[in-house]
Image (cartoon, helix red, strand yellow):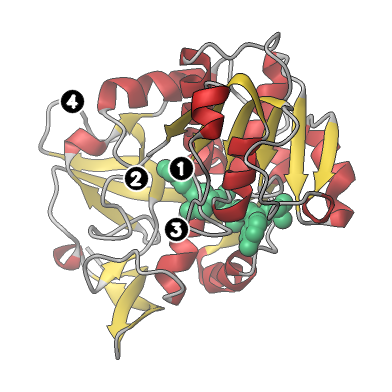
Amino acid sequence: MNNFRAYRIFDEGGKSQGRFVELTLDDLDPGDVLIRTAYSGVNYKDALAATGAGKVIRRFPCVGGVDVAGVVEESSDIRFKAGDEVLVTGYDMGVAHDGGFAEYVRVPADWVVPLPQGLSLFDAMALGTAGFTAALAIHRLEQNELTPDSGKVIVTGATGGVSGLAIQMLAQLGYHVVALTGKEHEGAYLESLGAREILLRSAVDLNSTRPLEKAQWAGALDAVGGATLAWLTRSMQQDGVIASFGNAGGAELNTSVFPFILRGVKLLGVDSAATKMPLRKMIWQRLANDLRPLHLHDMIRCVPLADLAQVFPAMIAGQSRGRTVVEIAAG
Ligand SMILES: NC(=O)c1ccc[n+]([C@@H]2O[C@H](COP(=O)([O-])OP(=O)(O)OC[C@H]3O[C@@H](n4cnc5c(N)ncnc54)[C@H](OP(=O)(O)O)[C@@H]3O)[C@@H](O)[C@H]2O)c1
């Protein structure tokens, strides 16, 4: 087989730096299933890995891309055969195992999810880790008794990939969604996704030192962390439940025990990458059915693999909107 293109990340003087290289199949990490990539997608973690803005790479050099959707080229595992449409998200992809920013990806069969009926390979990467994380977070909130009748649900980092998808899913399920954003000019976009209220970050006193604020939210999905997550803990209703999945604004969490012991607030962690296969498959089934965003394509832009590196700086600066799908060998 001929050489193929890949976006590989190197350690250059202690800093991660990505660039295009030509690889052969012998260069790829071992695995049972060889996938011909149709699409990948860009997640915040990919931007951290490729630019070195965050220390997420655990093995150099490594082909970037935490997500891939494509067609099985060959498999030594009986669960998969040539021609099957499949997807892989998370695990070590793009950080300690060669990932999706390449024309071929080889992975352990235990990581591979058959493409759910009703989703195309493009849809799978329009959702990607972002959609999977949004759905997993909603699933966890529901398991903790959140329903549309409980009250308002706030989504932070609202214009981001995970959060935009979460807003659509929650709105379709009948929740009253409040979008918290730093971007004054994106109100119409957030309303088009289904947000009923827009709250600007500048209008919120995130750094107040009160142990508790006015109780406002029955549920919260947090992409931001830091002062935003601390403020959420202080402003939840009685028995409110928060799903924490991101740190786009900070990794620290300075709060007190009062939200937990006086209001019964629950703080749930969401880790998409390590989700076990039975739950993973169930969440993908929901993504193809009741959680499938009806306006998915309205929040997607598509770039060819060659333009991949242009996507990262805006994402690191918190300036991107929606999801970016990377077209690799579609069709
Ligand atoms: N736990 C998991 O399994 C998992 C999975 C996927 C992603 N994540 C994490 O979730 C977060 C979002 O990921 P993503 O792929 O959706 O990224 P994204 O598309 O870049 O969205 C991040 C959003 O956060 C907001 N933001 C950025 N910088 C900020 C700052 N300094 N202060 C406050 N808000 C800021 C911005 O929205 P506004 O301008 O609208 O506020 C931005 O659009 C990241 O931290 C990512 O690492 C975790």
Ligand 1 is within 8 Å of the C-beta of the residue at disc 3: yes
How far across and how far down the image is residue 282, in percent?
A: 39, 18
The residue labelled by disc 4 is 79
The residue labelled by disc 2 is 90
Kind of residue indicated by mark 2? Gly
How far across and how far down the image is residue 65, in percent?
A: 39, 58
Q: Secondary structure at mark 4?
A: loop
Ligand 1 is within 8 Å of the C-beta of the residue at disc 1: yes
Evaluate whether residue 114 shows in this view: yes
Q: Nearer the viewer, residue 240 or 164?
A: 240
Q: Is residue 238 above or below residue 44?
A: above
Residue under the image location 26 percent in, 51 percent down: 92
Left or right of residue 27: residue 3: right
Single out the mark in the foreground, 4 or 2.
2
Residue under the image location 81 percent in, 56 percent down: 202
How far is the residue under mark 4 from the one under mark 2? 20 Å
How far is the residue under mark 4 from the one under mark 1? 23 Å
Ligand 1 is within 8 Å of the C-beta of the residue at disc 2: yes
The residue labelled by disc 1 is 129
How far is the residue under mark 1 from the one under mark 3? 10 Å
The residue labelled by disc 3 is 45
Q: Are marks 1 and 2 in contact (CB under 8 Å)?
A: yes
Choose the circle earlier in sequence order: 4 or 1. Answer: 4
Q: Secondary structure at mark 1?
A: helix
